[in-house]
Image (cartoon, rainbow, N blue to C red):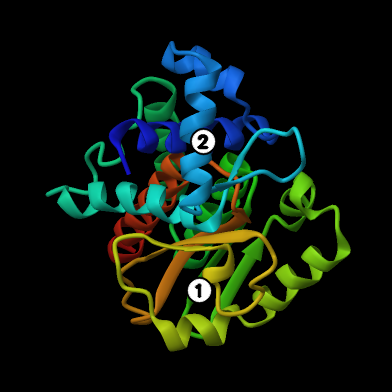
């Protein structure tokens, strides 16, 4: 894959996350200051490689799970290279993004009990991302945000809703079995062990807790989302929970 193809793929992912409609060559040509024909040729190569697909004839392109995986891997490398995860590891823009993270920290740190802090963290992630939020400490599981998740355009089909439900029914035993231990863990679409056709991604971070060695916080949302922003917020929420719980 060339650098330009990689940039076009990432642009398709980010545009699709924002607009929820297939991304066409005209839009990308404006972004890259080149002809639509050039973009179409590059999109054709990306489609052959399996990173994008055309959902309908004469429509633009959308990312595949493989395309998302390539993109997310690049974001995870930023986490791994960072010496201090509290710094701007995902290269978020200053201003609004920083204010959002500070607001998240303020809400969590205002709580004096671990259970309140966890609920606040999950509810805040629901509000900030529009995804379903979840946290688990040992055998306890807290979930919030079903309404926001199922209002997304991806879940107008009953079969997809059922697939999401199956995944959530099995989330606790699966986390206990897999025990994700990276700085941030992302399971995209068909990578999920259950609910493979649900078209969702699970973004989850492990955090240190004196109550359990299997403590996680994260969100479940459509594969079409702003991974850069959501991954950063999930990790930040985990760090804030560590501070509150150990200061309790």
Label 2: few (<14), some (14–19) or many (≥20) C-alpha neighbours in 10 Å: many
Mark 1 to mark 2 CA distance (whole Å): 41 Å
Residue 203 shows in the view: yes
Dot 1 or dot 2, earlier in sequence: 2
Q: Is residue 101 left or right of residue 13?
A: left
The quarter of the picture where the N terminus appears is: top left
Locate residue 172, reporting x and y percent: 56, 82
Q: State the residue position of label 1.
A: 136
Q: Is residue 147 above or below residue 45?
A: below
Q: Is residue 229 left or right of residue 40?
A: left
The quarter of the picture where the C terminus appears is: bottom left
Q: Is residue 238 above or below residue 90?
A: below
Locate residue 191, reporting x and y percent: 52, 70
* Secondary element at tag 2: helix
In this view, the mark in front (1 or 2): 2
Locate residue 140, reporting x and y percent: 55, 80
Q: Is residue 58 left or right of residue 54?
A: right
Q: Nearer the viewer, residue 190 or 240?
A: 190
Residue 91 shows in the view: no
* Secondary element at tag 1: strand
Q: Nearer the viewer, residue 126 or 27?
A: 27
Label 1: few (<14), some (14–19) or many (≥20) C-alpha neighbours in 10 Å: many
Which residue corresponds to the image point at 30% horizontal and 67% vertical from the top-left? 182
Q: Is residue 244 above or below residue 17?
A: below
Q: State the residue position of label 2.
A: 43
């Amino acid at each position: 894959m060339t650098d330009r193809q990689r940039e076009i793929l990432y642009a398709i992912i980010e545009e699709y996350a924002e607009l929820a409609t297939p991304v066409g060559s005209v839009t990308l040509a404006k972004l890259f200051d080149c002809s639509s024909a050039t973009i179409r040729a590059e999109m054709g190569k990306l489609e052959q490689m399996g990173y994008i697909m055309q959902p309908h004839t004469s429509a633009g392109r959308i990312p595949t799970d493989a395309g998302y995986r390539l993109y997310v891997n690049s974001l995870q490398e930023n986490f791994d290279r960072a010496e201090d995860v509290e710094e701007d590891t995902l290269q978020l823009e200053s201003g609004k993004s920083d204010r959002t993270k500070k607001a998240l920290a303020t809400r969590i740190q205002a709580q004096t009990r671990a259970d309140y802090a966890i609920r606040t963290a999950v509810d805040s992630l629901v509000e900030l991302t529009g995804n379903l939020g979840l946290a688990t400490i040992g055998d306890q599981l807290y979930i919030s945000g079903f309404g926001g998740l199922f209002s997304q355009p991806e879940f107008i089909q009953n079969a997809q809703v059922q697939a999401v439900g199956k995944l959530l029914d099995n989330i606790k035993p699966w986390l206990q079995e897999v025990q994700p231990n990276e700085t941030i863990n992302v399971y995209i679409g068909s990578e999920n062990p259950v609910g493979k056709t649900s078209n969702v991604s699970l973004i989850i971070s492990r955090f240190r807790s004196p109550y359990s060695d299997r403590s996680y916080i994260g969100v479940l949302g459509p594969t079409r989302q702003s991974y850069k922003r959501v991954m950063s917020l999930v990790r930040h929420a985990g760090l804030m929970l560590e501070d509150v719980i150990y200061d309790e």
